[in-house]
Amino acid sequence: SQGDWSISADGKTRTLVAKNPDGTVAWTRVTQILTLNDTTFTYRVVPNAANPNVYYDIVHTKVNHMEP
């Protein structure tokens, strides 16, 4: 995927904007931020808004390795 993302001013949500190769928007999703600090960034993805009981928590942590 390619696109843009931003974090709300209050730090509570992340907006993901996926883009097609020509730059047009493929989809937009707003996700809840669970943790955002110096070592961890975790946000929740709910694939189907009609069923919020099914979700995925995406966890990013700081790593120390060479870029691929």
Image: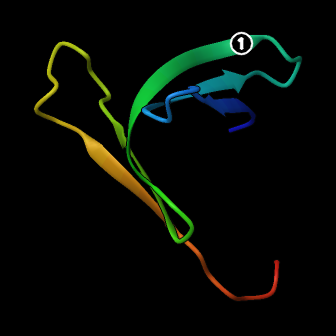
Scheme of image coloration: rainbow
**How far from the left and from the top, in percent, is residue 65?**
72, 88
| Vertical comparison of 10 with 62: above or below | above
**How far from the left and from the top, in percent, is residue 24?**
80, 11
Which residue ends up furthest to the left in the rendered image? 53
Quadrant where the N terminus sits is: top right
| Vertical comparison of 29 with 32: above or below | above
**How far from the left and from the top, in percent, is residue 28?**
56, 16
- Which residue is located at x 82 percent, y 78 percent? 67
Which residue ends up furthest to the bottom in the rendered image? 65
The number of discs equals 1
- Which residue is located at x 57 percent, y 67 percent? 38
Residue type, mark 1 in image = Val
Horizontal relation, residue 46 to residue 30: left or right: left
Which quadrant holds residue 64? bottom right
Quadrant where the C terminus sits is: bottom right
